[in-house]
């Protein structure tokens, strides 16, 4: 495999010039060469995709249009959606109730009338329909239905799934640097079957090209990245696919479906690379490979919030629009340096705490100083991942400073107004929720009868919440939280905050 990048570090070409595949014939017909070339606009949005060789001419699709609308609460969580064509959606056939029972390890011991079982490593061994086999690295290697082998899977030394055998069909995968399947070979004949083109997203499959027929299938995603429809170039047919919140669908055919992940039609499971996901259960088959760093429930999918979060690799939940690897590296560095940072004055300790617990909030508050130190380029890049922005490179330092100045001025104005009411005020108070999410409130107040109010200021009517705010604010409203760190006058560290809705005060 070879990759070509532009000056912005974006992949613009992926080529395969032949491969030596273990346990499979090499591609037939001598040297094999396929290439996908992409172009982008200034906002890093794909403009065009070209293929070499070029697929057969497309049949014009039947004219079709659909409009979707979404509504959100103050914590930036999706709470409603509408459409003018309900055929794009999947609705349950009838109302029903399924009872789940879990043990102390969060393993399901009963799902309705089914009794799942687990192996010694905590992997799902049986779900009532299939029995599963795993290697010592907890990778799924085989699926049985009674005495019949449904499928077997082989991995390379780097943990990438390289081969799948279903019945007599053996498929070999060639993957890219992100472990995405870019080509498929017939492991028996060596014939190239199909190849894929991807966008900038971690699971953003754009097209599937069938080599024998030289036809193309285009994927149409929704806001979660789920393939909501496919368009076949050979016939112009638009095939729609709807999903329930945890990925249940009326069909399990095709290649990429729920949140853009690869589905195995033979089992209905999704290959999330780090582990397998069962939409029927709404959870992973294997425990989290990063342990409790991803949460106390080792099997839960995105903290049971599939409407607002995705998990690109099977070990980290994030919003569909942000949370990239650059941000992970940045916060990982700061986490390792936290002890040293915590020994400097309190203002810097607050910044360090924000950097580790809520990178988006840290960047909102610290960016002016960092820009002044000449760190505008890396900070803007990290800010894009933390806040879900797509055009960080187009942001210029003086505009950043102007935005932050406006935010500080608005916050000071709100603080002055609160002081006139005679309440006890704590500024910049960090709250930890019961699930461990930390987020900092602009103001925490208490009136003469002890009523507490949580306040966050946003100078703009459209300013978004940071990731931790989006996760933490609803939990504070439902379960309360605890002041962490040294606290602030009137609100010392360790004090419990009762369930209190966070008031978000926005500027004009």
Image: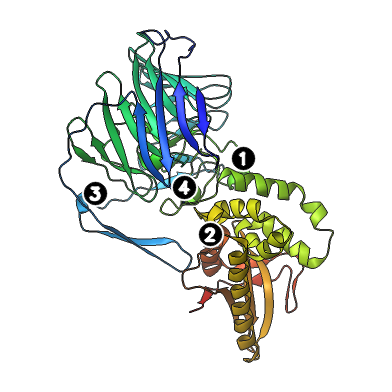
Which residue is the site of mark 4?
A: 44
Residue at screen point 20% across, 49% down = 87
Gap between marks 3 and 1 measured at Cα: 37 Å
Q: Which residue lies furthest to the left in this view?
A: 62
Question: Of callouts 1 and 2, which one flags the residue occurring earlier in the amino acid sequence?
Answer: 1
Which residue is the site of mark 3?
A: 88
Q: Position of residue 335 (x, y in %)?
A: 72, 49
315 w.r.t. 153: above or below: below
Which residue is the site of mark 1?
A: 291
Element under disc 4? loop
Gap between marks 2 and 3 measured at Cα: 29 Å
222 with respect to 361 (left or right): left
Question: Of callouts 3 and 1, which one flags the residue occurring earlier in the amino acid sequence?
Answer: 3
Gap between marks 1 and 2 measured at Cα: 20 Å
Q: Where is residue 295 in the image (x, y as percent from the top left)?
A: 58, 48
Q: Position of residue 155 (x, y in %)?
A: 51, 20
Gap between marks 1 and 4 measured at Cα: 34 Å
Question: Of callouts 4 and 2, which one flags the residue occurring earlier in the amino acid sequence?
Answer: 4
Residue at screen point 43% across, 50% down = 306
Element under disc 1? helix
Residue at screen point 17% across, 34% down = 59
Q: Nearer the observer, disc 3 or disc 4? A: 4
Question: Of callouts 1 and 4, which one flags the residue occurring earlier in the amino acid sequence?
Answer: 4
Element under disc 2? helix
Question: Of callouts 2 and 3, which one flags the residue occurring earlier in the amino acid sequence?
Answer: 3
Gap between marks 4 and 2 measured at Cα: 27 Å
Question: Of callouts 3 and 4, which one flags the residue occurring earlier in the amino acid sequence?
Answer: 4
- Total number of numbered discs in the rendering: 4
């Amino acid at each position: 495999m070879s990759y070509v990048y532009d000056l912005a570090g974006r992949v613009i070409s992926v080529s395969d010039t032949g491969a030596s595949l273990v346990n499979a014939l090499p591609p037939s017909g001598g040297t094999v060469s396929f290439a996908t070339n992409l172009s982008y606009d200034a906002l890093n949005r794909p403009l065009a995709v070209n293929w070499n060789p070029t697929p057969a001419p497309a049949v014009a699709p039947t004219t079709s249009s659909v409009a979707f609308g979404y509504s959100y609460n103050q914590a930036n969580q999706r709470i409603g959606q509408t459409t003018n064509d309900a055929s794009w959606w999947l609705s349950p056939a009838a109302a029903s109730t399924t009872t789940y029972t879990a043990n102390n390890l969060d393993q399901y011991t009963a799902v309705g009338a089914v009794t799942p079982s687990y192996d010694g490593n905590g992997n799902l061994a049986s779900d009532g329909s299939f029995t599963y086999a795993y290697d010592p690295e907890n990778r799924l290697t085989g699926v049985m239905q009674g005495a019949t082998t449904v499928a077997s899977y082989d991995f390379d030394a780097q943990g990438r799934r390289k081969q799948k055998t279903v019945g007599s069909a053996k498929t070999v995968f060639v993957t890219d640097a992100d472990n995405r399947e870019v080509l498929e070979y017939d492991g028996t004949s060596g014939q190239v079957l199909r190849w894929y083109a991807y966008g900038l997203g971690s699971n953003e499959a754009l097209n599937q090209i069938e080599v024998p027929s030289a036809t193309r299938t285009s994927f149409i995603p929704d806001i979660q990245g789920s393939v909501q429809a496919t368009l076949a170039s050979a016939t112009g047919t638009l095939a729609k696919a709807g999903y329930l919140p945890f990925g249940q669908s009326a069909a399990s055919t095709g290649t990429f479906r729920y949140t853009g992940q690869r589905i195995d039609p033979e089992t209905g499971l999704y290959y999330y690379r780090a582990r397998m996901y069962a939409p029927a259960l709404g959870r992973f088959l294997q425990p989290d490979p990063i342990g409790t760093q991803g949460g106390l429930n080792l099997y839960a999918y995105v903290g049971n919030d599939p409407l607002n979060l995705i998990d690109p690799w099977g070990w980290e939940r994030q919003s569909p629009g942000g949370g990239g690897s650059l941000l992970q590296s940045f916060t990982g560095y700061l986490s390792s340096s936290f002890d040293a940072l915590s020994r400097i004055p309190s203002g810097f300790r607050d910044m360090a705490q924000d950097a580790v617990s809520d990178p988006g909030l840290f960047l909102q508050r610290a960016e002016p100083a960092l820009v002044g130190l000449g760190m505008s380029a890396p900070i803007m890049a990290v800010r894009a991942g933390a806040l879900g922005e797509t055009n960080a490179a187009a942001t210029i330092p003086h505009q950043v400073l102007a935005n932050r100045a406006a935010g500080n001025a608005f916050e000071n104005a709100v603080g002055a107004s609160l002081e006139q009411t005679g309440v006890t005020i704590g500024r910049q108070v960090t709250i930890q929720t019961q699930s461990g999410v930390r987020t900092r409130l602009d103001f925490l107040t208490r009136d003469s009868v002890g009523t507490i109010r949580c306040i966050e200021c946003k100078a703009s009517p459209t300013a978004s919440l940071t990731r931790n705010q989006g996760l933490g604010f609803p939990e504070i409203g439902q379960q309360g939280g605890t002041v962490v760190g040294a606290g602030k006058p009137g609100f010392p560290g360790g004090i419990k905050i009762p369930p209190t809705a966070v008031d978000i005060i926005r500027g004009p």
